Amino acid sequence: MRHWIKSSFVDLDGWKKWVVLVCLEWFFKGRLNTVARYRQELSLKAVLAVKQVNTTIPIKAHKKYSYKLQGLNISHANHVWSTDITYIKIAGGMVYMAAIIDWHSKAVLSHRISNTMDSQLVMSVLNDALEKHPHPEIFNTDQGSQYTSEIHTKRLKDLGITISMDGKGRATDNSCIERFWRSAKCERIYLNEYQSISELITDVDDYIEFYNHRRFHETLAYKKPMDAYQEIKLNQEKAKAS
């Protein structure tokens, strides 16, 4: 049991999630303090988040859109999608990762990693998500130049998607994807030293597969994000058909 918990440490954030996984996979009725005790005995420590570099570079000439999520009850899948760019250090330099997350289910719907932080990166992620999933009602971003660019805003407006943007300097307005970045980095990325972008892409793909399909979320009543996303989407389709 100790070996199993220790090997699972890199995949799960927090001892509460450990005990849920133990209960489901080992059919063991434990207590939360049982895993906490194992954690202490094994001297397992969480990885602390590292202060991030600002990737939001606005252009004054670009139109900014108001923040539409203040006080909004985000009640279903595809109600709000959120996107952002973060940086990741690898041997020899820095690369950039963009992702889109469904706010309600926490499911990551698309992601890309690139050597450059430009409109091509965000458009690739956006088009991939739009091709794979029903379109959102609202799309939330920061005020970075990639998101305020004509090519990005026009794509959303042409599809009738409402554009929402964080207030200037207010990363908390996009808290859903900020929490995902923290999870991905503390649970996987900061635990590794990547020698190439291809090595990073392979590992990030693996982590997102885990995050979407195996990682429990307390805010989802310990469901997995993609399970919650598909369940909500199926219920919506049934409601429309009835």
Image: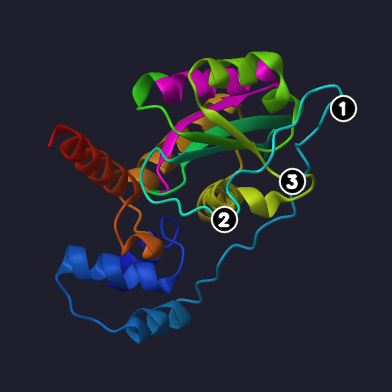
Check residue 111 for magenta coloring: yes
Answer above or below: position of 119 versus 104. above
Q: Magenta stretch: give its range.
A: 106-130
- Secondary structure under tag 1 reads loop
Disc number for residue 60:
1
Could you say which disc has been placed on residue 186 in the image? 2
Say whether disc 2 or disc 1 marks the residue closer to the N-terminus.
Answer: 1
Marks 2,1: beta carbons within 8 A: no
Left or right of residue 102: residue 99: right
Q: Residue 215: x and y, percent?
A: 35, 54
Residue 161: say if magenta: no
Q: CA distance from mark 2 to mark 1?
A: 34 Å
Amino acid type, residue under disc 2 in the picture: Cys
Disc 3 on helix, strand or loop?
loop
**Residue receiving disc 3:** 167
Q: Nearer the viewer, residue 217 or 14?
A: 217
Mark 1 and mark 3 lie on one chain; the one further toward the N terminus is: 1
Image coordinates for residue 36, horizontal then vertical, percent? 41, 81
Are there few (<14), some (14-19), or many (20+) residues within 10 Å of tag 2? many
Dot 1 crowding, Cα within 10 Å, few <14, some 14–19, many 20+: few
Residue 160, horizontal then vertical, whole percent = 49, 22
Whether residue 146 can be seen here = yes
